[in-house]
């Protein structure tokens, strides 16, 4: 059983007496409330965030020169104590120790945990704030809980700026450890109208699972914006200045107001000082894809939850990386001539509608994936309204629209799919014609819109009672005797036919 402790945030005199120790010959130092291991971009900024909320901190980094540099620069004058060995680091932390590990995801997290384990005492807790695979977090939680330590696998979103000023935090794992950490986490998280962007997500790897899906949704959002840009630039001929104005205007709308739309508007007006050209036009069209997008797709396949928009976004990045091959192919594989002669202003509104409808489908997929994972892995403990709420501030997908998602699941906790929530349903029904028109144009002029198309396919598949998989089942039974069910017989009864006879 993980022992309970009173909050360590308020320190009265008797507490300070117990938690001071002699350092050097004459100097007394208050023990540190919070420790951070790993002083790269995220660790440094999170450490400074924690310190700025009034918590004395200790820091440690494997390479001592980075620690020295941090102490000489950003930590100057702050309530930060550096340690140059893990033994020293552990000693200067008050008990129960609260240690945030912010190192490269994967094996380095295990190395740090293994080195820390023998130095810690029952009730101490480790938080892994990196982008760890939820299955690794599952394993680490079990392992550390079995030794009497608390483990919190915490997704952190918001990059460098969020880490410093208020990220979105997605902690899961040992519930009692989270309760100890809550007074600190609620202070360092982004603050929005309905509270700090942090909640206890669920047991085991639930925090990292929700962070993974957050990143999958981020992939989807970015690809959808890229496709809207491609159509408006290459089919409709909008200039960067016009694109800046369109995205700026979209950012004022209830449905699309978001961090990603805001930065997109900024990007279109940025002029490269060296060349005096718009920087966006000078950037190579080859995007990387790291673990989380791919993991989201793999998990969705394992759980049997369709997430075609996110899958399309991951594939689009993979395809973009074949730059040289695409360049060569473009000399041989021609497409239709690009021609748009409609009303630009009216069509821009249709692109906006297509973007919003596609985005609704993408979030419907993400929320369905979290719901299934919650049921399969986390005893139904992951709250969908809370997941949407903690993404409202601090993180890359922060958007006004998340409020509507939260409300949809508060109003109906058993909602089978976001698209069935009254507000989303009506919007998508009202705008589907515009959405389809945009896809028709893209297809006619030969511009690939994989995420827009996958979203529409998702909508058109989900909304149809009958799909053509009756034929698929017949084929499977024909060549493999896989059997089939019949619409005119009770579910569960299976049939086989000797088709060739
Ligand atoms: P990095 O992912 O670049 O990792 C660098 C840190 O890991 C350094 O402190 C390095 O120490 C330490 N480290 C390594 Br590498 N191997 C180690 C080992 N075997 N033992 C101990 N320490 C080791 O840092 P980051 O960009 O700050 O990201 C940290 C985590 O946060 C990652 O999981 C990342 O995916 C996640 N994340 C990053 C962002 C972002 O915007 N960057 C956003 C959200 C989440 P050294 O100095 O001795 O080499």
Image (tube, grey):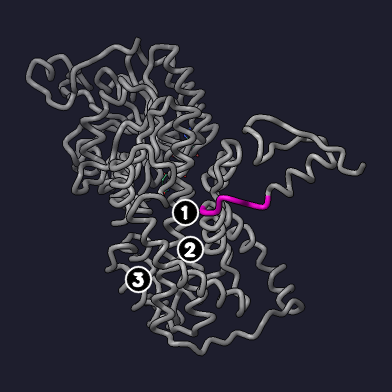
Label of residue 224 in the image: 2
Give the mark toward the camera: 2 or 3: 2
Badge 2 marks a residue whose secondary structure is: helix
412 is higher (above) or lower (below) than 202: below
Tell me the residue at 30%/21% (across/down): 97
78 is higher (above) or lower (below) than 405: above
The magenta region covers: 463-468
Which residue matches tag 3?
A: 266
Location of residue 208 by image quarter: top left
Q: Is tag 1's residue or tag 3's residue first in the polypeptide sequence?
A: 3
Which residue matches tag 1?
A: 362
Residue 118 x %, y %: 43, 14
By secondary structure, the bulk of the magenta-drawn segment is best described as: loop
> Does the image show residue 282?
no
Q: CA distance from mark 2 to mark 3?
A: 17 Å
Badge 3 marks a residue whose secondary structure is: helix
């Amino acid at each position: 059983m993980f022992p309970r402790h009173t909050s360590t945030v308020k320190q009265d005199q008797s507490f300070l007496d117990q938690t001071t120790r002699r350092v050097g010959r004459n100097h007394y130092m208050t023990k540190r409330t919070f420790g951070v291991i790993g002083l790269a971009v995220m660790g440094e900024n999170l450490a400074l965030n924690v310190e700025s909320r009034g918590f004395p901190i200790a820091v440690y980094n494997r390479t001592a020169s980075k620690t020295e540099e941090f102490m000489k620069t950003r930590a100057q004058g702050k309530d930060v104590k550096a340690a140059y060995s893990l033994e020293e680091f552990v000693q200067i932390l008050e008990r129960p120790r609260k240690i945030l590990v912010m190192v490269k995801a994967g094996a380095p997290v295990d190395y740090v945990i293994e080195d820390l384990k023998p130095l810690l005492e029952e009730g101490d807790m480790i938080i892994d704030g990196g982008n760890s695979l939820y299955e690794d977090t599952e394993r680490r939680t079990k392992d550390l809980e079995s030794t009497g330590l608390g483990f919190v696998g915490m997704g952190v979103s918001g990059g460098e700026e969020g880490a410093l000023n208020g990220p979105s935090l997605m902690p899961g794992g040992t519930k009692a450890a989270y309760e100890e950490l809550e007074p600190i986490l609620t202070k360092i998280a982004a603050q929005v109208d309905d509270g700090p962007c942090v909640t206890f997500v669920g047991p085991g790897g639930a925090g990292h699972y929700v962070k993974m899906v957050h990143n999958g949704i981020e992939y989807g959002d970015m690809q959808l914006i890229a496709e809207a840009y491609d159509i408006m630039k290459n089919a409709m001929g909008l200039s960067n200045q016009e694109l800046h104005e369109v995205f700026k205007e979209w950012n004022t709308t209830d449905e699309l107001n978001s961090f990603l739309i805001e930065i997109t508007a900024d990007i279109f007006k940025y002029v490269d000082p060296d060349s005096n050209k718009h920087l966006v036009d000078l950037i190579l069209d080859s995007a990387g894809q790291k673990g989380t997008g791919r993991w989201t797709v793999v998990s969705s396949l394992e759980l049997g939850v369709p997430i075609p928009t996110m899958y399309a976004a991951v594939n689009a990045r993979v395809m973009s990386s074949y730059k040289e091959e695409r360049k060569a192919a473009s000399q041989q594989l021609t497409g239709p001539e690009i021609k748009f002669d409609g009303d630009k202003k009216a069509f821009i509104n249709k692109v906006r509608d297509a973007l919003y409808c596609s985005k609704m489908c993408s979030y419907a997929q993400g929320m369905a994936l979290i719901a299934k994972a919650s049921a399969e892995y986390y005893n139904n403990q992951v709250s969908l309204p809370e997941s949407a709420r903690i993404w409202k501030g601090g993180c890359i997908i922060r958007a006004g629209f998340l409020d509507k998602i939260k409300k949809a699941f508060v109003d109906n906790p058993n909602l089978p799919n976001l698209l069935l929530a009254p507000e989303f349903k009506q919007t998508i029904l009202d705008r589907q014609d515009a959405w389809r028109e945009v896809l028709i144009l893209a297809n006619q002029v030969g511009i690939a819109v994989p995420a827009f198309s996958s979203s529409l396919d998702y909508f058109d598949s989900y909304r149809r009672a009958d799909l053509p998989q009756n034929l698929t089942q017949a084929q499977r039974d024909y060549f493999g005797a896989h059997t089939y069910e019949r619409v005119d017989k009770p579910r569960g009864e299976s049939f086989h036919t000797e088709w060739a006879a």
